[in-house]
Amino acid sequence: MNVQEAAAPPAPTSTTINFKPRSAYVDNKAKAILDGVALQLQQTADATAVVVGHSDKGESKALAQRRADNVKKYLTQSKGIDAKRIETRTSTAAGKTAEVWFVPAGASVPAETAPAAPAEAPTTPPPQ
């Protein structure tokens, strides 16, 4: 009996989109980078993307979400990528960026970009 070990799925890759301070505008430089991500998604129908928005110190967390949302909006509205294939998240790490992860089928996004697990409620011993 010949049993072959299943090949590991390809590792996810990330691309960084830079934003101006206090801005969520996807400029032409960002669009050029995102065009490459869109091409990967178009060529790999079972792959997905995860967009992780960041905001710098002094910027709101809402700005991080707007950055992620604007990247997704460009990929869906301008490049025709199905919105169900793109997940948006925010990170607590500082930066005027959005990370765009290309995730092949069967792969998962590295832990540092995964959403934090909900905190468990502290347990208190029952009264005695």
Image (cartoon, grey):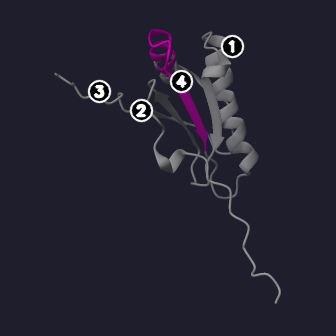
Q: Which residue is mark 1?
A: 77
Q: Quadrant of the C terminus?
A: bottom right
Q: Nearer the viewer, residue 86 or 76?
A: 86
The residue indicated by pointer 3 is: 6
Q: Quadrant of the rendered structure where residue 62 is? A: top right
Is residue 6 visible in the rendered structure shown here? Answer: yes
| Marks 1 and 2, the one that precedes in the sequence | 2
Q: Secondary structure at mark 2?
A: loop
Label 4: which secondary element: strand
* Rendering quarter of residue 18: top right
- Magenta segment includes 69: no
Measure the alpha-carbon separation of dots 4 and 2.
Answer: 10 Å
If you read the primary sequence from the N terminus, does the residue marked by circle 3 or circle 4 appear first? 3
Q: Mark number for residue 55? A: none
Q: What separation in Å lies between label 3 and label 1 (alpha carbons)?
A: 37 Å
Q: Position of residue 57 (x, y in %)?
A: 64, 58
Check the image and report above or below for 78 versus 33. above
Disc 1 crowd, CA 10 A, few/some/many (<14, 14-19, 20+): few
Q: Which mark is residue 12?
A: 2
Q: Is residue 74 above or below residue 92?
A: above
With 27 as the anchor, is 32 left or right in this view? left
Location of mark 4 (residue): 48
CA gap between label 3 and label 4 equals 21 Å
From the viewer's perspective, is the residue at label 1 or at label 2 nearer? Answer: 2
Q: Where's residue 55, x and y in %?
A: 64, 49
Q: Are marks 1 and 2 in contact (CB under 8 Å)?
A: no
Please state which amino acid type lies under the numbered disc 4: Thr
**Three-letter amino acid code at disc 3?**
Ala
Amino acid type, label 1: Gln
**x 46%, y 33%: residue:** 15
Q: Secondary structure at mark 3?
A: loop
Q: Which residues are magenta?
A: 37-53
